[in-house]
Image: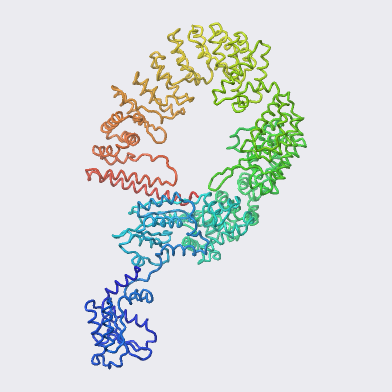
């Protein structure tokens, strides 16, 4: 039994006699066919009243038979009443008609008979020889419900149901059919959104009103349906309905469908389109009911605030549903429903749909129809179909006025309707009337093609803006692009960029070019005399005016003077030319991104610029590598860009052009790579990376062969350059492509065998490294390189191998399980191989050092470690020979050699005389590293050998420091045995040099934490040294835990005040103060005055550490429980003492918020008890800084809620009268924050982050 049938029965039971008679008369007239006449003798004409008489009505039927009708609403003694009515109809005195003329008696009653009662009445009629028709409440109710619904409205006051409250299966069916199956079906496979689904399910369990907001086409309805379906499975007592907008009032449907004792969950889809329905549903939602109602609302994000305003007084949860990510769109279109697996197709669909699942579905179907044409063709038909389908009741494409306005909004994206200057310009330029413009806006808003809020108009989606801009200004030229560009460029250059480039990518270069080319030419001619304006224009439109762009730069390059130097360098650092680009190369290199008729010209023009400006070759090399990287797109086009470029490069290099040849050698390394790390800009400022392995096709084979041939032919004249290319030819495991490598080795190995000499170490090393590297790769089938192994296994290479440390390579020679074992084995090998009998054997080591430095330019550690072990071992075996070896090494290899710690330690510790010898050697050694070596010597100097001589030498050394130096000052305490003031003298010298010369001589913070005695109780030196180190010591986070400060404080409490006086300078010199903590002070007794003094200073100076924390907080950071009690008690007393000083109160409460958050409420109320002055209250920022937040955040709303929390605290204060002014202020402040939130929403609406 439906709710409507029940309601009909209820209304029939309650109906009055006159109303019942009127209803039944109408019912019988509608039911009976061929009625010749109907007479309502029991009703007063023109009135809703009955009159006494028999019968109540009579009717002459089609066969001329007569029937009497009686009506009764009597509930008691029904059988007696009906029998009496029958008797009256047969009473000639009452009817004036003989009984035999009466064929039938009809009895209508609004109650129910039992079977026994019905049989009794029918038997009574048969005894009288008359047919009787009993029409009771059940017959009436069902007939009205099923056949005569209008009677329920006209006589019972029950409205006819509008079909807006739909069971889910019917809602899904209607939704799927609504757009001829072009929208995403609601009953297809549910993909993604699993995280959001669980979040929404959890929210439905805890709240009765859930709002899901988001952009159009992202699946709000789909996930709403899915959430409710899963909720019903978990909560079977609920009945689900969906509310569908039908344009009529829904209140009566609600009364009919929703029983007060049942549980319901309602989906209100697109609430922004049915706010009146939503308002009426909320009325039912708020009613007292036995059953529960849960509501899930979907709403477009631009209208979210309207929904929030309607529900401001209700508990709710709002969840913002983001667009589908590119990955999610790809998984949707690659599902079994669409089977789009080709990467290029997927990429194009992702761009076209922009996270809109509807468009992705349509684009997938189009791709399956058009195939290859889809990738390069015009897809405007897709959008014609998309928008035409959804506007089936509105002929959008033939309404030029509406299309004009839509095109204008698409270009400007957002228009402020209060901007009279802009609007008047638009009206005049595009010949649109004020009323036409606004009527079009209303129509477009109704169709949800645009969004209107804050008196601003904006396009609903970025893809829509692209399409309608293209359609109106380019494809159909409904509005003039020439007018647009001449009046709004360059002021709105970004809007041209965001309109033209997407239109080009979506609808094809030729389709855009042919329509706007003439307009662009005219504009450029007008700006030809203004170089800056012309360049600004070409910066955006160079792709449509390539010849003009190249002609401009050709003229500029031609005017450059011939170069003074022809030194063509190619090296550059990783960050070079990233932020600053040479303008000419920037423009020219843009042509390298595409294959056009201008590609070759641009390459030649770029190299001509380099010929004139050799210093820019490194940047040009970088631009070439960035733009000519191999990719999937190049593969589809046969790698034509790369092939054409290499052809030009080799041809010009063969003609003796030095700048081409220099570029060739550098670029060969790039073009001979076998895999390329491709970085591509994605949508919405995203960046994507992928590895592109080079396929082995005929075109790539020929390309690589041409590069190798040119290299081999250049070897005689440029052996070093060719060697560098071959040396660096080392694709890693992930980069190596077996087929390509086999091909390359087939060319490379014969050349190396014939042209590389084993007697030249770098060649031998190069070959052996190549063999070792390729032997580790099991995917290579061409092993011809192994034939070179013995030929290039020279004595020099073997010596190099001994000296070099390579754990992985040496696995071939040693058995070891860890680094320690390897180190021991390697050390023994070095000691054995390089243990010399006399000086004549030294060259073996020196040659090995030279060779290792030759091939490991930036890696001296292996040689240094080996040399250290060799010096130590030779000295131990033969002091004189070992020391001579050290002297020779010091003289032969002054650059790059690391400090031989073990060797010098062995010599220095051998005896005082040997110690003096090695010092003498170091003292006279002039080298960039000599200062460091001397400092290291004094760390190794045995304590027993220290005397006045070494004390003087160390002081002289410190005096000679003229660069950044790190000293281990604790080691100097050993020298105090000779001179008790030595450490203090050293520390004084360090402090003086740091101050006077601006040097950075740093030392460890342990000196202050554990060795303050080194300063000999000189507080001035202690404090000065500490502050110097705190500012300059960046080799570590100096005194990060504050142990040094605490140690000085224990001996000199006044140091705390000196420290806070230095805060500003500390921060100015780059050392932030956020990590500083004075929390230790609360552990000590008798320092209250110092704490108060420091507190007052910090408050008065009003300094902040970082963006959030006041410097005063450093007194209360990192407190244990006992210290926390003391610290908070101190702040309380300060608040009482300075309760009228707004500046101090501000700081104290900032400290409470950051360090005693849990005490804020109590402290706040305590303060109001001692000072509730309004002006002072207003001067204090009671909520503080909200901090850094990410995502869709409204600071206005956040601050409004935080001020509301303050108001809630004020409401708890006992003296209500005293709080009246403060409460009034807080309410205005909250209102102000909400106004700012409104401004934030308006700003976001006009510039959405799509």
Count of numbered labels shown in the rendering:
0
Is residue 565 visible in the rendered image? The answer is no
Location of residue 1116 with respect to 678 vertically, above or below: above
Give the colour scheme shown.
rainbow
Q: Nearer the viewer, residue 907 or 1247?
A: 907
Q: Quadrant of residue 858?
A: top right
> Residue visible at 53% across and 6% down?
912
Horizontally, residue 658 falls left or right of residue 1142, namely right
> Residue visible at 31% across and 93% down?
101
x then y, percent, for residue 926: 60, 14
Is residue 731 visible in the rendered image? The answer is yes
Q: Nearer the viewer, residue 963 or 736?
A: 736
Q: Quadrant of residue 856?
A: top right
Question: What is the quadrant of the N terminus in the image?
Answer: bottom left
Q: Nearer the viewer, residue 950 or 465?
A: 950
Location of residue 386 with respect to 790 vertically, above or below: below
x then y, percent, for residue 1068: 45, 28
Q: Nearer the viewer, residue 1087 or 129?
A: 129
x then y, percent, for residue 492: 55, 50
> Residue visible at 55% across and 64% down?
397
x then y, percent, for residue 1154: 35, 35
Location of residue 1233 with respect to 38 vertically, above or below: above
């Amino acid at each position: 039994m439906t709710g409507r049938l029940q309601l009909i029965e209820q209304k029939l039971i309650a109906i009055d006699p006159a109303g019942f008679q009127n209803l039944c008369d109408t019912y019988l007239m509608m039911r009976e066919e061929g009625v010749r006449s109907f007479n309502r003798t029991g009703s007063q004409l023109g009135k809703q009243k009955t009159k006494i008489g028999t019968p109540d009505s009579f009717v002459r039927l089609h066969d001329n038979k007569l029937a009497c009708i009686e009506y009764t609403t009597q509930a008691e003694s029904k059988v007696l009443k009906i029998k009496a009515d029958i008797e009256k109809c047969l009473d000639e005195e009452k009817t004036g008609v003989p009984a035999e003329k009466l064929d039938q008696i009809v009895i209508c009653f609004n109650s129910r008979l039992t079977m026994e009662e019905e049989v009794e009445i029918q038997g009574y009629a048969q005894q009288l020889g008359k047919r009787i028709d009993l029409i009771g409440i059940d017959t009436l109710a069902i007939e009205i419900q099923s056949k005569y619904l209008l009677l329920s409205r006209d006589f019972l006051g029950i409205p006819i149901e509008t079909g807006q409250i739909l069971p889910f299966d019917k809602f899904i069916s209607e939704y799927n059919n609504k757009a001829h199956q072009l929208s995403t079906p609601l009953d297809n496979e549910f993909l993604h959104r699993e995280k959001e689904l669980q979040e929404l399910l959890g929210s439905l369990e805890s709240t009765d009103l859930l709002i899901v907001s988001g952009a159009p086409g992202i699946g709000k309805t789909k996930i709403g349906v899915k959430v409710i379906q899963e909720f019903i499975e978990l909560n079977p007592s609920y009945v689900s309905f969906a509310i569908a907008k039908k344009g009529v009032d829904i209140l009566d449907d609600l009364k009919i469908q929703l029983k007060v004792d049942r549980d319901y969950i309602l989906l209100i889809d697109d609430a922004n389109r049915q706010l009146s329905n939503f308002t009426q549903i909320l009325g039912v939602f708020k009613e007292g009911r036995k059953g529960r109602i849960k509501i899930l609302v979907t709403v477009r994000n631009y209208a979210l605030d309207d929904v929030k305003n309607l529900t401001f007084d209700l508990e709710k949860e709002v969840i913002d549903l983001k667009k589908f990510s590119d990955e999610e769109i790809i998984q949707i279109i690659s599902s079994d429903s669409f089977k789009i697996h080709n990467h290029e197709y997927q990429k194009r669909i992702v761009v076209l749909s922009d996270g809109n699942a509807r468009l992705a579905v349509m684009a997938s179907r189009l791709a399956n129809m058009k195939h290859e044409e889809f990738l390069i063709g015009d897809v405007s038909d897709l959008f014609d179909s998309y928008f035409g389908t959804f506007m089936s009741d509105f002929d959008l494409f033939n309404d030029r006025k509406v299309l004009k306005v839509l095109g204008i909004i698409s270009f400007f994206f957002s228009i402020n309707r209060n901007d009279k200057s802009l609007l008047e310009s638009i009206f005049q330029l595009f010949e649109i009337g004020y009323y036409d413009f606004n009527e079009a806006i209303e129509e477009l808003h109704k169709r949800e093609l645009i969004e209107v809020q804050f008196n601003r108009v904006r396009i609903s989606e970025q893809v829509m803006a692209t399409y309608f801009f293209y359609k109106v200004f380019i494809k159909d030229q409904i509005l003039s692009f020439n007018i647009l560009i001449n009046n709004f460029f360059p002021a709105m250059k970004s809007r041209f960029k965001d309109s033209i480039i997407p239109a080009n990518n979506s609808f094809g270069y030729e389709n855009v070019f042919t329509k706007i080319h003439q307009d662009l030419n005219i504009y450029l001619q007008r700006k030809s005399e203004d170089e800056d304006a012309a360049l600004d224009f070409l910066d955006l439109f160079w792709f449509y005016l390539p010849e003009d762009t190249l002609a401009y730069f050709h003229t500029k390059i031609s005017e450059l003077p011939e170069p003074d130097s022809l030194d063509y360098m190619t090296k550059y650092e990783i960050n070079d030319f990233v932020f600053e680009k040479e303008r000419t190369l920037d423009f020219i290199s843009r042509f390298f991104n595409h294959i056009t008729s201008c590609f070759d010209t641009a390459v030649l023009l770029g190299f001509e610029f380099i010929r004139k400006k050799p210093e820019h070759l490194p940047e040009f090399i970088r631009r070439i590598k960035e733009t000519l990287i191999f990719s999937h797109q190049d593969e589809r086009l046969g790698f034509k860009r790369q092939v054409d470029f290499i052809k030009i490069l080799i041809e010009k290099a063969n003609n003796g052009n030095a700048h081409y040849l220099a570029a060739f050698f550098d670029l060969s390394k790039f073009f001979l790579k076998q895999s390329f790390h491709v970085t591509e800009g994605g949508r919405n400022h995203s960046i994507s990376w992928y590895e592109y392995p080079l396929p082995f096709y005929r075109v790539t084979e020929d390309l690589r062969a041409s590069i190798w041939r040119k290299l081999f032919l250049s070897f005689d004249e440029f052996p070093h350059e060719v060697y560098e290319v071959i040396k660096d030819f080392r694709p890693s495991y992930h980069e190596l492509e077996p087929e390509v490598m086999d091909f390359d080795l087939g060319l490379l190995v014969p050349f190396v065998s014939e042209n590389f000499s084993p007697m030249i170490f770098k060649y031998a090393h190069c070959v052996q490294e190549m063999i070792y590297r390729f032997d580790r790769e099991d995917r290579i089938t061409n092993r011809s390189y192994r034939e070179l192994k013995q030929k290039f296994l020279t004595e020099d290479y073997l010596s190099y191998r001994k000296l070099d440390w390579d754990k992985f390579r040496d696995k071939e020679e040693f058995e070891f399980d860890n680094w320690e074992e390897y180190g021991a084995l390697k050390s023994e090998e070095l000691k054995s191989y390089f243990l010399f009998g006399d000086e004549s054997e030294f060259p073996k080591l020196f040659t090995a050092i030279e060779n290792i430095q030759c091939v490991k330019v930036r890696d001296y550690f292996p040689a240094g470690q080996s040399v250290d072990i060799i010096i130590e071992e030779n000295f131990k075996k033969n002091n004189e020979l070992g020391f001579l070896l050290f002297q020779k090494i010091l003289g032969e290899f002054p650059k790059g050699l690391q400090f031989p710690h073990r060797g010098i330690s062995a010599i220095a510790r051998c005896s005082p005389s040997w110690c003096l010898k090695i010092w003498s050697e170091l003292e006279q050694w002039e080298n960039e590293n000599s200062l460091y070596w001397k400092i290291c010597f004094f760390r190794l100097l045995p304590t027993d050998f220290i005397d006045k001589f070494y004390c003087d030498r160390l002081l002289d050394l410190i005096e000679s420091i003229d660069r950044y130096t790190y000293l281990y000052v604790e080691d100097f305490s050993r020298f105090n045995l000779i001179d008790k003031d030595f450490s203090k003298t050293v520390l004084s010298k360090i402090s003086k040099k740091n101050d006077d010369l601006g040097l950075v001589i740093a030392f460890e913070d342990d000196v202050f934490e554990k060795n303050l005695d080194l300063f000999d109780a000189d507080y001035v030196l202690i404090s000065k040294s500490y502050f110097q180190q705190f500012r300059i010591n960046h080799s570590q986070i100096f005194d990060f835990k504050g142990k040094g400060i605490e140690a000085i404080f224990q001996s000199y409490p006044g140091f705390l005040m000196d420290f806070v006086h230095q805060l500003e300078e500390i921060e100015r010199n780059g050392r932030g103060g956020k990590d500083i903590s004075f929390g230790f002070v609360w552990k000590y007794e008798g320092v209250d005055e110092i704490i108060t003094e420091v507190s007052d200073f910090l408050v008065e100076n009003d300094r902040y550490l970082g963006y959030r924390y006041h410097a005063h907080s450093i007194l209360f950071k990192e407190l244990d429980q006992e210290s926390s009690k003391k610290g908070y008690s101190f702040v309380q007393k300060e608040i009482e003492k300075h309760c009228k000083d707004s500046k101090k109160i501000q700081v104290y409460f900032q400290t409470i918020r950051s360090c005693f958050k849990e005490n804020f409420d109590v402290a706040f109320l305590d303060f109001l008890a001692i000072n509730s002055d309004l002006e002072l209250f207003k001067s204090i920022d009671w909520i503080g800084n909200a901090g850094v937040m990410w995502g869709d955040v409204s600071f206005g709303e956040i601050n409004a809620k935080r001020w509301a929390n303050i108001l809630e605290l004020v409401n708890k204060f006992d003296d209500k009268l005293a709080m009246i002014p403060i409460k009034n202020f807080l309410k205005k402040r909250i209102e102000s924050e909400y106004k700012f939130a409104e401004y934030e929403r308006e700003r976001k609406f006009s510039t959405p982050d799509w």
